Image: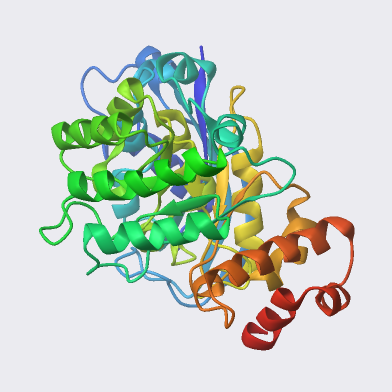
């Protein structure tokens, strides 16, 4: 029988095995007491199993309130629990209820975080996964041998459709590969999505007619399900090549439904992920969280970048990007590195990831370049050229004024 394997980091005032068994029972066929009909045969077929326990450090105070009984020592451990596929079938919504549901409320734990998740092939058969991924995105953008370099429309909100189109047109003329809406910009009264798409794609298509290069624009279509379908079709009809969804806002069923009918890559934004993951002893780590969205069908997924402006450490960013590029049932997703990025992080990013199969998005690191956006784009390409050639940025900057200006501005 196929099984789902979930790995948790727990903290508990009791024996970690007892705590793990409580989680396994609560999230499968058990409750706090044995009930009629809960036979040994039923438990053997449908009960979750504690597969592995690795004890870690102990602490003298609980990370989260409400654990019982109170104790002088709270023990931490990594525990792996498997669940029969028969309990849920290949359903993402039931999978989430199983591995990331009521267990967070159990009084037997003072900390609980889902850190990894492995699902059997039945899920890949039920959900199509990414339609484009790395290779499809490279084909649509025409970018080979380096990252897809992009930016976010700023100001985040407030620009009219025509003002947005002028900005995107200027960025296209400057040589950019990719532009995305901010997650705060969807279908507001001051910039209705249909009008924004019409204006922006007029500029993008005109640039493509002149140069042969079509900039990929990820329009934020996050909305009610029927509206998302209409928005997607608007982008497609205008010649667009990407749509974006705020994953935590639209939810798994909406994203999976969009994937099944979409003809364009889906750019997955993770805004709200910090709420789920920032506490080290609570929530869902990126690697596990991303499994749901990879199955549902995103083609690109945000990971933050090195030395970002948020809370996330570089080690976490690297692990997240590598997780997306590790095949899961034969598919990979393109990592999107952003947040406080400029040319200066390119060498370390390449050294630590060992690949250019990523999007490298820079807001202020491009738009605020002292030489203007075109110089900002040039500096980013030069930073990656130096990284790929194994040359120190300082040496490469002596030959490339845009990179030198960037280093004077941002370093």
Residue drawn 10% across and 58% down?
Answer: 189
Identify the residue at the far left of this view.
189
Say whether residue 257 is left or right of residue 324: left
Where, quadrant-wise, is the C terminus in this rendering? bottom right
Residue 294 in view (yes/no): yes
In the foreground, 42 or 295: 295
Q: How is the image coloured?
A: rainbow
In the foreground, 298 or 278: 298
Residue drawn 31% across and 60% down?
Answer: 164
| Location of residue 376 in the rendering, given as x and y in whole percent from the top left corner | 60, 70
Q: Relative to 79, say whether 111 is above or below.
A: below
Identify the residue at the far bottom of this view.
408
The mark tally for this picture is: 0
Say whether residue 119 is left or right of residue 399: left
Q: Relative to 132, say whether 184 is above or below.
A: below
Which image quadrant for residue 59?
bottom right
| Location of residue 279 in the rendering, given as x and y in whole percent from the top left corner | 44, 67
Residue 29 in view (yes/no): no
Residue drawn 23% across and 53% down?
Answer: 186
| Location of residue 386 in the rendering, given as x and y in whole percent from the top left corner | 82, 64
Residue drawn 27% across and 45% down?
Answer: 197
Identify the residue at the far front of this view.
210
| Location of residue 80 in the rendering, given as x and y in whole percent from the top left corner | 56, 40
Say whether residue 72 is left or right of residue 69: right
């Amino acid at each position: 029988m196929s099984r789902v394997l979930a790995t948790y980091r727990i903290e508990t005032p009791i024996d970690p095995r007892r705590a793990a068994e409580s989680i396994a029972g609560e999230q499968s066929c058990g409750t706090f007491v044995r009930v009629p009909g809960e036979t040994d045969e039923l438990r053997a077929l449908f009960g979750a199993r504690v597969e592995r326990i690795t004890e870690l450090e102990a602490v003298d105070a609980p990370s989260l309130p409400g654990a019982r009984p109170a104790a002088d020592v709270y023990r931490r451990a990594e525990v792996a629990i498997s669940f029969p596929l028969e309990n849920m079938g290949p359903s993402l919504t039931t999978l989430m209820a199983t591995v990331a549901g009521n267990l967070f409320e159990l009084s037997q734990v003072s900390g609980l975080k889902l850190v990894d998740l492995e699902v059997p092939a039945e899920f890949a058969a039920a959900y199509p996964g990414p339609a484009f991924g790395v290779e499809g995105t490279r084909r649509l953008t025409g970018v080979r041998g380096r990252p897809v370099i992009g930016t976010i429309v700023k100001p985040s909100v407030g620009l009219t459709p025509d003002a947005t189109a002028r900005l995107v047109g200027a960025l296209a003329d400057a040589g950019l590969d990719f532009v995305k809406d901010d997650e705060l910009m969807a279908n507001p009264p001051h910039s209705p999505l249909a009008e924004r798409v019409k204006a922006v794609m007029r500029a993008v298509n005109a640039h493509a007619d002149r140069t042969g290069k079509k900039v990929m624009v990820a329009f934020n279509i996050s909305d009610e399900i029927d509206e998302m379908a209409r928005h997607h079709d608007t982008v497609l009809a205008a010649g667009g090549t990407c749509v974006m969804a705020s994953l935590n806002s639209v939810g798994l069923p909406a994203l999976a439904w969009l994937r099944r009918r979409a003809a364009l890559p889906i750019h997955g934004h993770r805004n709200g992920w910090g709420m789920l993951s920032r506490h080290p002893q609570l929530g869902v780590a990126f690697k596990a969280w991303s499994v749901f969205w990879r199955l549902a069908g995103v083609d690109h997924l945000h990971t933050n970048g090195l030395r970002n402006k948020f809370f996330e450490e570089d080690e976490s960013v690297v692990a997240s990007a590598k997780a997306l590029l590790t095949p899961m049932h034969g598919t990979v997703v393109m990592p999107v590195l952003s947040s406080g990025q400029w040319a200066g992080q390119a060498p370390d990013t390449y050294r630590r990831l060992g690949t250019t199969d990523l999007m490298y998005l820079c807001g202020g690191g491009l738009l605020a370049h002292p030489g203007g956006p075109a110089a900002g784009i040039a500096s980013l390409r030069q930073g990656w050229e130096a990284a790929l050639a194994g040359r120190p940025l300082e040496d490469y900057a002596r030959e490339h004024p845009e990179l030198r200006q960037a280093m004077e501005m941002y370093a």
